[in-house]
Image (cartoon, rainbow, N blue to C red):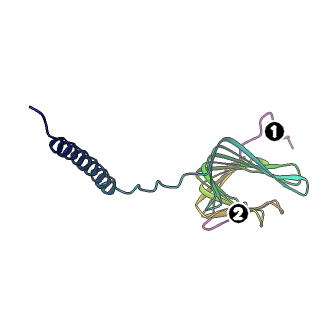
Amino acid sequence: MGISRKFIQGLVLFIALGVSAVLVFGVWRGKTRTAQQPAPVAAPQDAEMKLTDMEFTEMQEGKRAWTLRASEAEYFQDEQKTALKAVRITFFLSDGDEIRLESNAGILYAGSKNIEVWDSVRASLPRGYELTTTRAAYDHQKRLISSETPIQLNGADVVLEGSRWHYRISDEAAVLEGGVKASLSFLPKQGKTTSARPK
């Protein structure tokens, strides 16, 4: 039995329409899935630059003003600041002495070069004084180290406590203010004895 040409053409047309319908459904389904996908959420801004074992020295008139070291530094360009960990700052005085300031965390502001430190702040001052507090700041323009949190200052034979403190580097002078308390301890020097002469 022969198959008419019209039947074959109709069959080919049916198959073609079926394939077209499958393709159209596939494209529509793909567009629907794409439209249903949630918009990507912007990730929080990360630091533009991260450094480890950072060291920076500020020079003034050919001399070292201070050196900043940190175990880790993260620079944020939009805020023009660098977040620091394990901070160590050395300030160089005109007479050759140094002030060493340490803390667990801090921030260096790029524009002003001001510095803030906090979390277990410790400072080693000239003449053997040691200072402890919770937060301190350095004003680069004024060359001033200060703290507005309670501090304790330990010397060879004195312990001072106060609510605020500042040290002006240009004058090499410290001021302790706010309910200052002092504890003195006088220890006899080693190797010396006292004796009374008979009259």
Q: Is residue 59 magenta?
A: no
Q: For mark 2, what is the residue? A: 166
Relative placement, left or right, of 5 versus 138 is left
Quarter of the image where one finds residue 86? top right
The part of the chain drawn in magenta is: 173-199
Name the quadrant containing residue 28.
bottom left
Quadrant containing the C terminus in the rendered view: top right
Q: Nearer the viewer, residue 78 or 184?
A: 78
Residue 10: x %, y % from top left: 17, 46
Image position of 137 with respect to 128: above or below: below
Q: Which percent across, then down, holds residue 54?
A: 70, 43
Return the x and y of residue 7 as percentages of the image width and height.
Answer: 15, 43
- Residue closest to the eye, 1 or 183: 1
Decide which of tag 1 and tag 2 comes sooner along the chain.
2
Q: Which mark is residue 195?
A: 1
Please state if 163 lies on the left or on the right of 168 as rendered. left
Question: Disc 2 residue type?
Answer: His
Asked whether the viewer can see residue 182, the reply is: no
How far is disc 1 from disc 2 in space, using C-alphas? 44 Å
Whether tag 1 and tag 2 are in contact, CB under 8 A, the answer is no
Of 90 and 177, the residue lying toward us = 90
Residue 118 or 115: which is nearer the viewer? 115
Percent position (x, y) of residue 197? 85, 40
Prevalent SS, magenta region: loop
> Circle 2 — which element?
strand
Q: Residues within 10 Å of mark 2 (few under 14, many from 20)?
A: some
Q: Amino acid at mark 1?
A: Ser
Residue 194 is covered by the magenta coloring: yes
Looking at the rendering, in which quadrant would you find the N terminus? top left
